[in-house]
Image: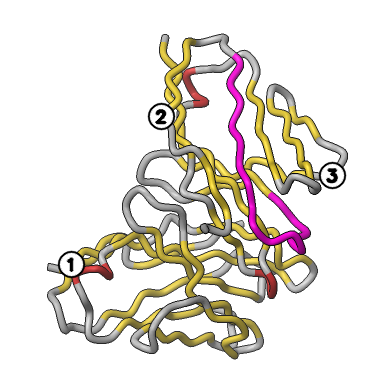
Amino acid sequence: DAGVTQSPTHLIKTRGQQVTLRCSPKSGHDTVSWYQQALGQGPQFIFQYYEEEERQRGNFPDRFSGHQFPNYSSELNVNALLLGDSALYLCASSSAGDRSIQYFGAGTRLSVL
Amino acid sequence: RKEVEQDPGPFNVPEGATVAFNCTYSNSASQSFFWYRQDCRKEPKLLMSVYSSGNEDGRFTAQLNRASQYISLLIRDSKLSDSATYLCVVLGATNKLIFGTGTLLAVQP
């Protein structure tokens, strides 16, 4: 049973570029949440998707957008990258039965130069 | 004020020691609480949920004081493998997890 998988594992971009990160949830899960973890900080909630719609959103600008597909996988897109967007981006999946129990993928480490 | 506050540490303890981490949260309406463990450059992993009555899992004991909005984690008989960052987590409105900054534990041989 595969857990939460994310791709790519590492990414280097330059300021102003755009990036797409991908996440496949754990088998049986329908909800995907995205978090940003800067160095030395705890993860910060970006947004949550289920039933292919953004349901909740944290305090992130519109440059951060996402999508969920019919197979429950999800993408996180960040436009007009800033140096401050450098972070570990974590995807977490959960089931409709209990969205509080969230399992994390290994993350994508994004470096913006 | 941060929604979830933790002492960042580091806590340097010898093997076999007992260590306690504390955490406070600001939203009195919060209903669910967790401790996650995060190893260096890895993803957070759920260590245990925290219940009002307190709960224990082997060497780990978690407690919740709703009146004081305070959560604790006690680790007994520390092992080298317990070295990690321990994240206090509160479930916010609409199922978003709110993380503290984490407390770094280093268990020394």
Q: How many C-alpha atoms fall within 10 Å of the one at disc 2: few (<14), some, or many (≥20)? A: few
The answer to whether residue B46 is left or right of residue A65 is right
Q: Residue B54 in the image: x percent, y percent?
A: 82, 36
The answer to whether residue B65 is left or right of residue A74 is right
Residue A2 visible here: no
Please name the amino acid that badge 3 sits on. Ser
Residue at 49% over, 24% down: B81
Residue A103 in which image quadrant: bottom right
The verdict on residue B27 being magenta is yes
Where, quadrant-wise, is the N terminus of chain A in this rendering? bottom right
The verdict on residue A8 being magenta is no
Q: Which residues are magenta?
A: B18-33
Please name the amino acid that badge 1 sits on. Ile
Question: In the rendered image of this protein, does residue B34 appear above or below residue A98?
Answer: above
How far apart marks 3 and 1 lie (CA) works out to 44 Å
* Subunit that carries the residue with mark 1: A
> Which residue corresponds to mark 3?
B52
Q: Residue B29 in the image: x percent, y percent?
A: 77, 64
Question: In this figure, what is the number of numbered marks?
Answer: 3
Q: Which mark is residue A12?
A: 1
Q: Which mark is residue B10?
A: 2
